[in-house]
Amino acid sequence: MKQVAVIGAGASGLPAIKACVEEGMLPTCFEKSGALGGLWNYTREVREDQSCVMKSTVINTSKEMLSYSDFPVPKDYAMYMHHAYVLKYLNLYAKEFDLAKYIRFRTEVQSVVMANDYETSGRWDVTIKELQSGKVTTETYDAVMVCIGQHTYKYIPEFAGIEKFKGKIFHSHDYRDCRGYEDQKVIVVGVGNSGVDTAVDLSRTSKQVYLSTRRGCWVSKRLTDKGAPDDMQSYRRYLIALRDRIPTGILEFGKIRKMNQRFDHKSYSLKPEHGYFSQHPTISDDLPNRIASGSIIVKPNIKRFLENGAEFEDGTVEENIDAVFLATGYKYNFPFLDNSLIEVKGNRVDLYKHLFPPNLKHNTMVLIGIMQQIGAVFPISELQSRLSARVFKGDIQLPSSTEMWNDINRKRDVVKKRFVQSNRYTMKVDMVPYMDELAELHGSKPDLYRVAMSDPTLAFQCFFGPCTPYQFRLEGPCTWKGAREAIMTQWDRTWHPMKTRPTGPYSWIESMETYLYAIVCLLMAYCLLIVFL
């Protein structure tokens, strides 16, 4: 039986353990902390080598899109979960599949190097330290899955005069809640999701929050028409097929028009020069209201720090600043791996399918969950793990190093053309197309033409409905008997938490909308068939 070392017991490490067990291998997971969950394991303690959500964090992806492919989030959990429920879900997942017995807690991986017989075996020597006893040992494994994520090591850019500033300076990595900042003036640098969430949270009790941005951003919301999750409406196969065939300029015009219907980004000083599809979505339901109320003031990039404040690039100065939070992102770092194995260049790691180092003789090492995804990381990491496990077993053969590099370079060019130049946009992937790409290799991408022959209702849901992760358990290795039911009942679980009082049946007008939508979908299907054929 092959033995696999899994490093990290968070949202990527847990499905990695399970994938190994499914494929008949023996995983051993090393977790530095005393509990599973990774960054979702909230604690007020700040540790440099341990990422953590803030106290008020609510996920930006709906529970159905976030679910692992054979374990839906419980129906009574909120549509968008507070981080405490995300951790509960991870613990339920670990309990359901008996994963905890494979985890060694409070164990730090110090190094991973090629074993003496690597040339013939592809094995790895893993040196670990038991943090309670201090004991250091080296163990040999047939394969290694690195699952430490992408939110651990802070990226802090240089600012002129920052050493002169006499207030407090933190990275958003260290922010937990607004306690201690009541009636203070605070600057938050960065308008990614962490920066916006930090600014909104601080604005509830601080005297004034200044939100500094170099480029601006387009701000999306969690809910769309009728309060449905935006991602469940957007991540649909027919829409993705249409978007691939519609000129980008038309898509940009329509999307930006929709963004500005909610609030005019120019009037709110957030309008960027780049298009909507050239950035990672910044999702906030509260930011426009906080700006409108004056509790958050948007400012340009900081030109230089002063002793008690900052000068911005437009020449304005804000003084008597008590604290600054740098929501400037993270950098890739793998301290237990030698640069000859994994090299980070410009905050980019060149990996085949964002998984496999292309220069290794044996494909026995993978990095799970480090791509910069637009969408939910949980199901992506799971599918990466399922693919990796079958590669370790020898059931899937990967292409040559040359072909891998060709694929890496093609993807790098696509990212450069589409996204703004930034450390944040080096390994971007769109959730559904990327999962389809992995599933094709793995053998679990659903063949909807074949499904339509035997189960047209299911095929209709898969093509026109949300592309939830359960679709990747319908066919291929390690299918799940409950996948069809999970797909057909995904909307029931979505709406269930809100049904807390009787409201009576839908009116005939409301009921007709469903049928009209079905007719529109059928017409679209007919048009697409004409295009395809």
Image (spheres, rainbow, N blue to C red):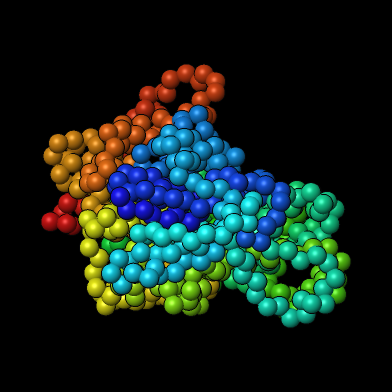
The residue shown at (87%, 66%) is: 320
The residue shown at (27%, 33%) is: 481
The answer to whether residue 149 is seen in the rendering is no
Q: Nearer the viewer, residue 331 or 254?
A: 331
Asked if residue 141 lies left or right of residue 189, the reply is left
The residue shown at (55%, 41%) is: 87
Asked if residue 308 lies left or right of residue 277, the reply is right
> The C terminus appears in which quarter of the rendering?
bottom left
Spot the residue most to the bottom: 160
* Number of residue marks: 0
In percent of width and height, residue 395 lies at 22, 55
* Vertical placement of residue 231 versus 165, above or below: above
Q: Residue 475's image quarter?
A: top left
Q: Nearer the viewer, residue 6 or 300?
A: 6
Q: Nearer the viewer, residue 78 or 140?
A: 140
The residue shown at (65%, 75%) is: 157
Asked if residue 167 lies left or right of residue 111, the reply is right
* Vertical placement of residue 174 versus 214, above or below: above
* Vertical placement of residue 399 versus 296, above or below: below
The answer to whether residue 133 is seen in the rendering is yes
In percent of width and height, residue 524 lies at 25, 48
Q: Residue 115's image quarter?
A: bottom left
In percent of width and height, residue 127 lies at 50, 62
Q: Nearer the viewer, residue 36 or 121?
A: 121
In percent of width and height, residue 437 lies at 29, 59
Q: Residue 427's image quarter?
A: bottom left
